[in-house]
Image: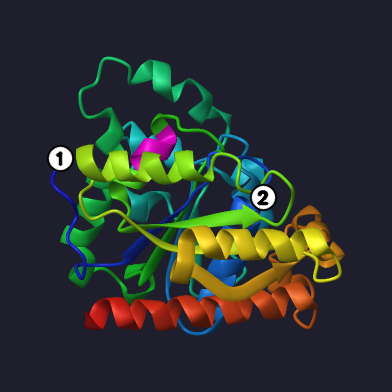
Amino acid sequence: MTGAIPAGTGPRILAIANQKGGVGKTTTAINLSTALAAIGERVLVIDLDSQGNASTGLGIDVPARLATSYNVLIGESSLVEAAVPTAIPGLKIVTANTDLVGLEAELISEGDRPFRLRNAVAELNANWQNLPEADRYTYVLIDCPPSLSVLTLNAMAAAHAVLVPVQCEFFALEGISQFKATIDQIRATLNPVLDIQGVVLTMHDARTALSREVVANVRSFFGPKVYDTLIPRNTRVAEAPSHGKPLILYDYDCAGSQAYIRLASEIIERERHYRAA
């Protein structure tokens, strides 16, 4: 199965990915999904990181993770069956735990190993019109691990587009050209519709010349793909996950929360242009 999932049938699927760790992928998945739900979208987060940080950050304790993304990828559970509600209306999550650690070895001899998630999404799409409204998601956000593993390949094979968080720090552009080449390769081999939906600059400190320089360099490299919204370096952003809450619930008025709300609006606007094209 190497054909792409067509756009416009079921939810819009965005993989949040960057081969570099510590750039804010999970923070973006948690807070962007919450912001999208807050403005009326029905959102499913798929946690594909064995650390399960997105699951923790959305308030799902480890004992409550009965059916996880691992069960979906080995075919034991559908996305609808594995999705659990969060404290945010309109937002569900397929959780993750350490079961994912051994998945690559389990699937080593399976010819469809990069397409397990895409198969699950295809099943969701096929039943979409008959599902309860709460399960008719308009967006699926996939939180990827910080490596180009079989899990990330599954995310990119299933996605319509990739959202790339880039940290405003010295090594921000290290590997970015390689990551873009990876996306091009996946488009050529696994998913011909895959595109970069946008690049979000995270941990921005407007007071430093370094942050300003990184912003300029990333905009020069990616052009209009870079969102106007900058996610600030903010202590409340770092504190929220330890309380098992998205930032918007933890401190709605802080600069980080307001930035993610603006980013969600910007993404929706970009999606409108995409769908009209």
Q: Return the residue at label 2.
A: 56
At x 31%, y 45%, the residue is 184
Q: Which label's residue is closer to the chain start, 1 or 2? A: 1
User: Looking at the rendered structure, which numbered label has been put on residue 138?
Assistant: none
* Quadrant occupied by the C terminus: bottom left
Residue 247 falls in image quadrant: bottom right
- Which one is nearer the viewer's eye here, 235 or 170? 170
Q: Is residue 237 left or right of residue 172?
A: right
Please say whether residue 233 is one of the residues in the magenta stretch.
no
Q: CA distance from mark 1 to mark 2?
A: 33 Å
* Residue 263 coordinates in the image, percent (x, y): 57, 76
Work out whether residue 102 can be spotted.
yes
Q: Which residues are magenta?
A: 151-155
Q: Return the residue at label 1.
A: 2
Most common secondary structure along the magenta stretch: helix
SS at mark 1 in the image = loop
At x 78%, y 58%, the residue is 210
Residue 63 falls in image quadrant: top right
Work out whether residue 60 can be spotted.
no
Instruction: Find out whether the residues at labels 1 and 2 contact each other: C-beta distance under 8 Å.
Output: no
* Residue 12 coordinates in the image, percent (x, y): 32, 66
> Which amino acid, by three-letter code, is at mark 1?
Thr
